[in-house]
Amino acid sequence: MTLCKETEPIKIAERVNDEFQVLAPKLDLDTPWFGYISFKNKNENFEFRIGVHADKNEKIIDWHHPIAKYYYQKLEIGEEIELEPPYRNIQGAVTAYASAEGYSGYLKSLVWNDFKGTAKIIRLDDGTFVDIHENQNNDNTKVTFSKPQQEGLSDLISLLTPEQYELITQKTSEPLIIQGRAGSGKTSVALHRVAWLLRDENEIQEHHKKTKVLVVMFNKALQCFVSQSLKSLNLEDKIEINTFHTWAKLALESVFKGQLIPLSYFDLKELFDKAQFNDNKKLGLIKSHAGISQLMEAFVKAKAKKVWELIENKIKEYDIDGIRHQFKRSTTAYVQDIIEFRKDIKYRIAQEKDEYEINRLSQIEIVLQNIYEKSILYKEELFELLNHWEWLMKCIPNLTEENAKSVGLRQKIIQTKDKASSAKVGKYIEFDDYALLLRLVQLKRGGLPYGILGEEIFKFDHLVIDEAQDFGAMQLLVLLESVTSRTGVTIVGDINQKIAPEKDFVGWDEIAKLLNIDNAKITRLEVGHRSTLPIMWLADSVIGSKPILQGRYGIYPKIKSVQSSKQLKEEMIDFIIKRVEQCPNAHICIVFRNKNIIKNYLNDLKYLLRHKKIEVREGERDTFSFRKGVTITNIHQIKGLEFDSIIVGDASENHWPNDLDSCRLMYVAITRAQENFLALHEGRATPLFSCLNDPYFWKPVERFLSQKDFKPVQIIQEEWDEALSVIDLEL
Ligand SMILES: Nc1ncnc2c1ncn2[C@@H]1O[C@H](COP(=O)(O)OP(=O)(O)OP(=O)(O)O)[C@@H](O)[C@H]1O
């Protein structure tokens, strides 16, 4: 079916709708294709439809195809394109391009661009099509259509901006570091990049035993949210996606085979209280300092030297043919070297017939086995390392002797809990020890062990770190060492959303240094796509960031004062009922900074909304549900997530004073909202919203939104120079 010959956008949408109904059942997709581009030269018209999957018979190319690049580049109508080989015979001027979104085989929306301009057509619930581009206004309730239920990151293959497309398709010869505004698509770009790389056989070979791509984040609920989007990206079962905590725990369990017991925050508190030890948070922080890594490296190097001297000494009388000299002696990975050495000796024994030779080699094997067993006492070595206060002071700048000694004492309390009298340490560790132990294993083995016997080393081909701002230096280092090449990494984050204040973020330049590429390109994504422009404007003002006038129109965020908690609940109910009437699939999140009051609201709201068939539930870690309805949760659960609407239920000064942590947490809360943001407060309002007292605060947004198409006005340098050039001076 040719679309480019039709000139009426509504008719085009109807034709696409017919096409979708025929193709969708066959291609088994909501949206059989999502992108369209046509171009024309003197002799020919070319038309391409772009989909997630190619279908030759239906003339659909997939989004990896080189021609799809022109769709993503959002060329100007009339712009000439000439394809690179082998498609050189395809060339002409762009006549139209469009993006389409379907739902259950029907066209849901179509953005059509041709020489007449842009049309944005949507299908209403009654099956008719309207062009909403012409009728845009600030009220998102005027055009009613069913927003589909969203249970994971929405699929945006069709919507990628040219900048996002370029990042996704960047080769792995360079690491990708992206920082950017909330909702600018960082997580989405990282996942699409993995999907892109997994399609390209030259980049990542799929491994038949273990997945070769690791995606790590900090927040459990975000991991669940993102996991729900993997199917549409064709990434299900192809990647490992985990929180750092779970990934590190699993990795350590395979090393220690059940000999580790992590201590919770409460266990630690009890331990320190009992020992009358002041658990100074700062002391815990020392463990995630990059200096410890240098110390560890020096420590392992020294051990390696000693161990090889010992091996030399012990086996020289049996090693008449100098086998020991044939083996690799890495500066740090001596445990792996011993494993290889022992494997070879075992092989020689198996081949040998001569009894004397077998005995001789067996003696060597016994020595190696004994030394190997003593070399994998990682917990004991960590204990030794942290109890050397002089070493700690050398590697961590400005560390006082008192604090250095306290680090050791603290470690003693943890690691000697319930230990057997014959052992140096017990089974207990704290969360920060995960990274330290893994790093120690990596140094001594050259990577993390893998395979039934644990003798092989496994590395990922590609690593994605999401929410990088919440990782400590040691955790980042462990992750970066788990990937084959440091260029095979995608790291994304936003310092304004740092909600783990106890960890010092190493900074973007430092990450580039850790990657050993000091000049690595750090890309910044500026446009927030999740929230409307008014919501982003407020969020940027809360963190004092320079706002940008770009984005979707929408209604203004509200802050309301209430007199009692009864009235607060009434306001919530009123908001929820109205919003669900407008948008039945909306997922509304009520968020509190104070975790302890959630249960109280949960029960009351369940009761008050019982007749409206609106589900109310608590959101917590991996039990977080992303279905329509109401989720009540605390601020630390929602980073990276998105909701139709956000209500902050305790927006008073008590809970949200004007400090850095509050600013960042409030920024996270505001930017989770796609359409609506409401803050309610009993008592004095948080000073974070004082910008709203400025009568001019919304003026720039109002002016911008009143423009017909919301493109920011760009002034190019020449225009600027020309406008300001002074030719005659009237003196
Ligand atoms: N080019 C785009 N067009 C339309 N929507 C987009 C685009 N890019 C991203 N989005 C949408 O914006 C939302 C935010 O995307 P994503 O979660 O990837 O951003 P983020 O930068 O990781 O956000 P945050 O920092 O807040 O976690 C998602 O719903 C995503 O589908």
Image (tube, helix red, strand yellow):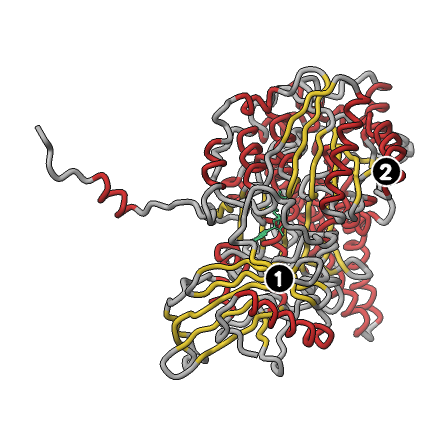
Q: Which residue is mark 1?
A: 129
Rounded to the nearest whole Å, what is the CA distance between mark 1 and mark 2? 65 Å
Amino acid residing under circle 2: Lys
- Seen from the viewer's position, the closer of residues 327 and 288 is 288
User: Could you say which quadrant of the image residue 402 lies in?
Assistant: top right
Element under disc 2: loop
- What residue lies at 61% left-to-right and 32% top-to-bottom? 504
Q: Any mark on residue 404, and which?
A: none
- Pinpoint residue 445: horizontal percent, then vertical percent: 69, 52
**Coordinates of residue 98 in the picture (x, y in percent):** 53, 65
* Residue 477 visible in this rendered orientation of the protein: no
Q: Quadrant of the C terminus?
A: top left
Residue found 49% across the figure and 58% down from its top: 166
In the picture, which quadrant includes the N terminus? bottom right
Type of the residue with mark 1: Phe
Tell me the residue at 82%/75% (across/down): 353
Residue 415 on image: x %, y %: 81, 32
Residue pointed to by mark 2: 427
